[in-house]
Amino acid sequence: LSAATLSLFFCGAGQIYNGQGKLGALMLLTQILAGACNWAVIQLWPSLVALADLFGVSEWHLMLGVAAADVAVILMMLASVHQAYRFADEEAGGFAGTGNPVLSGLASLVLPGWGQLVNAQAGKALVYLFGFLSGVYLVILTRLTPFLPLLASVDAEKVFMPRVTAGAMVMVGVTGVLWILSVYDAILVAGFRRRMA
């Protein structure tokens, strides 16, 4: 549980905790570099667009490339949590969960999926965590980047723009529902296990 929790907040920290220093350092460095690159892309966007134009890459394609790289980083973060959990679970001989509904519920309230890790349900935790990270990324993509204006510029017939806007609103709603379900599920499972013990 400790290794997976560390990897939830700092990609690779769980691997370092598990004694996999090189793998953990590589994952942590990748997350730090991804964050630095995103900050640099936001600050240098006009210059990057001009540079990409020299190579025949449109601003829209540049944006799609950056978004694809960000999705790859999110998937790496999820893989870090899963690998840290599985490695620690195999080394320690299995983790059955804490059986504490309050702790599980509070963990999922702080971060969807964390309560499922507390309940020893790594697969379910990744589903909730992926839903949450996808929703957060979608909000960042549509609010802090030029994604929507670029989409409007390439969607001359206004076919995709209403669908993307509606899809984004649905995804944010689904993220909120998943968050609530994560808390409910964590409390329910921990309570059931406590009664069965």
Image (cartoon, rainbow, N blue to C red):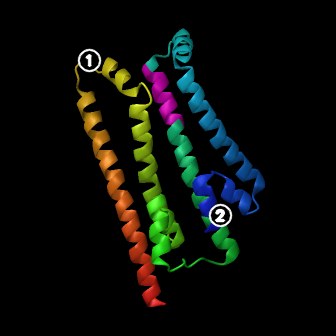
Toward the viewer: 115 or 85?
A: 115
Using the numbered discs, state the Cα–Cα distance from disc 1 to disc 2 in whole angstroms.
Answer: 49 Å
Left or right side of 132 for 166: left
Residue 123, can we see it? no
> Number of marks in the image?
2
Mark 2: few, some, or many residues within 10 Å (few <14, many ≥20)? many
Residue under circle 1? 156
Disc nearer the start of the sequence (1/2): 2
Q: Is residue 24 above or below residue 189?
A: above
Amino acid type of disc 1? Ala
Residue 73: x %, y % from top left: 56, 42
Left or right side of 83 for 60: left
Left or right side of 147 for 51: right
Determine the main secondary structure of the stretch shown in magenta.
helix
Q: Which residues are magenta?
A: 60-69
Q: Is residue 62 magenta?
A: yes
Left or right side of 96 for 171: left
